[in-house]
Image: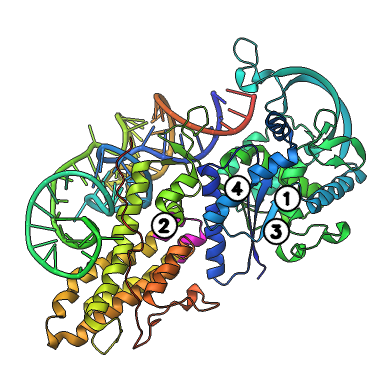
Amino acid sequence: MKPFYITTAIDYTNAPPHIGHAYEKVLADVMARFQRLQGREVYFLTGVDQHGQKVQKSAEKAGLSPAAFVDGITTHFTALWDKLNVRFDGWAATTDDRHKRVVRAMLQKLHDCGQLYKKSYAGFYSVRQEQFLTDKERGPDGQYGEEWGEVVELQEENWYFRLSEHVEWLKGHIRSHPDFIYPPHRANDVLNSLEGTPQDLCISRPIERLSWGIPLPFDEKFVNYVWFDALSNYITFAGYMAEECGNEGLPKFETIWPADAEIIGKDILVPAHAVYWPIMLHALGFPDDQIPKLVVHGWWNVKGAKMSKSLGNVIDPNVLSDTFTPDGLRYYLMRDIATGYDADFSDERIIMSYNKELAGGLGNLLNRSINMAQKYRSGVLTPGDFDDEINQALRQTVAEALPAYLEKMNGWDIHEGIAAAWRIVTHANAFVDSTKPFSLAKDPAQATRLDSVLYHLAEALTHVTVLLNPIMPTAMAAARAQIGWTLPEGFLVSDLKWGLLSSGHQLGTPTPLFPRLEIAEEK
RNA sequence: GGCAGAGUAGCUCAGGGGUAGAGCAGAGGACUCAUAAGCCUUUGGUCGGGAGUUCAAAUCUCCCCUCUGCCA
């Protein structure tokens, strides 16, 4: 089976990351880790989009060169991914020379086969948004609104890509490939946008207006503008044209393409990823079965409002990670949203998810289980011969969790996958109350039953630490350390069978895994 | 205006022809191994409105309303 190739949108290095950036990368990381746990080889690519006018302007304002400015912002992203344990295999920085070489080679290829042409265009141009404006952007008063910033009249020649020639192909592709976009209902938005007269795509900026970009190989008076620079990262960093361009240190393209999942936010589906991108690939000669699959996620809103700097409601993932631990944040981001839909961020809910679920549910279960085993058996497990219906029921819950978990995780329903694993936690907590090991410990006649109960608890917990490993890698490793069991090299989720812990297994020392947080309501 | 998504308990949401569900919040209780965590019980809903199909509709059909998104 080909490696699972997963990408995220590359973030624009104009401002530091917010919770939406964090969500997308954690989602990709969780899926990458899950696929590895299923035994699939994975290539996980993420990165930063560093070129463009906004960066050039921001750099000027900061009195820095674009390269220096971009390096500074990029550090905010890489530091956050490191902090949140987002472990990617490839880093797509669009200023990477390898990328620039491939972009130029791609453009030359398209130029050679007549897909690009030069044309003059006159109109109103928004400096802030880096785009020409049409009448539909005018407000009711006929003026361009403040959101466009400075608007200037421009006439200029530019290079265009014959996008319109491929629109009919794209419509057909979308209709005949229902798995092209997840969730499937998003495809309607794309088809909708393809109604009307197709336009070609402007792909350049004159170098005097924008110098911070990749020069066109066949006309050095222009730099490439955004799409061929940004979208193509998904193939350039997968090794596309690596040999022709002398690129090294990249995967073998034929082995990993097409991408199994390009994770993007719903705001960049139309037109960038669902129109420009597949058409670019099609024009480059990619056959239909080499078009990547898109996974479209929703947004984190704050109190029902869109997050924005002007509202002052931008949530800083660094602060959340410091407060709730990286894994506490990862857990919240995965469990409180349905993939593809929007969710509301709330302090109350993240506190609840940490204190109630992680601390009180899973953490406390681990703590009480190990503590009792230490107290009554010096931490040594003996499965023994005792069995009864209560034990069987717990084993059944553990066994049933796996297929449910796999189905949900493979279908991108991460929050349902968590819920599937969590049924073990809930059942195990109830199991303690129904078996009362602390009472059994007082009766020597119940010794074998107590052994079996303690064993069942430890074993069930061990299963949980495997299932939740993609979501909370650090915390689950810490939990396994307390259990005294390490994930064997190459261990797969399919290896999960009752009896991971052998007779005579020595448990470690119990320590609160998620110390309960005393946080006053801030709002 | 077109298309799509959503509207179910106070909150967040699941379900999708056969007695309305979960988690959280609220109320009560028993317990003590544990991070005062956990467990049990329980209050709470004309499933957005209306009509239709059906023995039976939250679920299917039609009309309407509200919110969100994409497009115009």
Which is more N-terminal, label 3 or label 2?
A: 3
Residue on which disc 2 sits: A416
Q: Amino acid at mark 3?
A: Pro
Chain of the residue where label 3 is placed in the rendered structure = A
Label 3: few (<14), some or many (≥20) within 10 Å?
many
Q: Which type of secondary structure does the marked residue at label 2 adopt?
A: helix
Report the residue marked by disc 4: A77
Counting residues from the N terminus, which is met first, the one under dot 1 or under dot 2? 1
| Disc 4 secondary structure class | helix
Please tell me which of labels 2 and 4 falls first in the chain: 4
The residue under the point 67% across, 68% down is A2
Question: Is A416 placed above or below A469 here?
Answer: above
- Horizontally, residue A67 falls left or right of residue A355, namely right
Q: Which residue is mark 1?
A: A233
- Measure the alpha-carbon separation of dots 1 and 3: 13 Å
Q: Residue A253 in the image: x percent, y percent? A: 76, 62
Q: Which residues are magenta?
A: A406-418
Say which of marks 1 and 3 sits in front.
1
Q: Is there any visible trace of residue A11 in the rendered image?
A: no
> Which of the marked residues, 1 or 3, is nearer the chain's N terminus?
1
Between the residue at mark 2 and the residue at mark 4, the CA separation in whole angstroms equals 29 Å
| Distance from the alpha carbon under mark 2 to that under mark 3 | 27 Å
Residue receiving disc 3: A258
Q: Earlier in the sequence, mark 4 or mark 3?
A: 4
- Relative placement, left or right, of A305 versus A437 is right
Q: Nearer the viewer, residue B35 or A136?
A: B35
Say whether marks 2 and 3 touch (CB < 8 Å): no
The residue sitting at 92% across, 45% down in the picture is A112
Q: Quadrant of residue A135?
A: top right
Residue at the farthest bottom position: A385
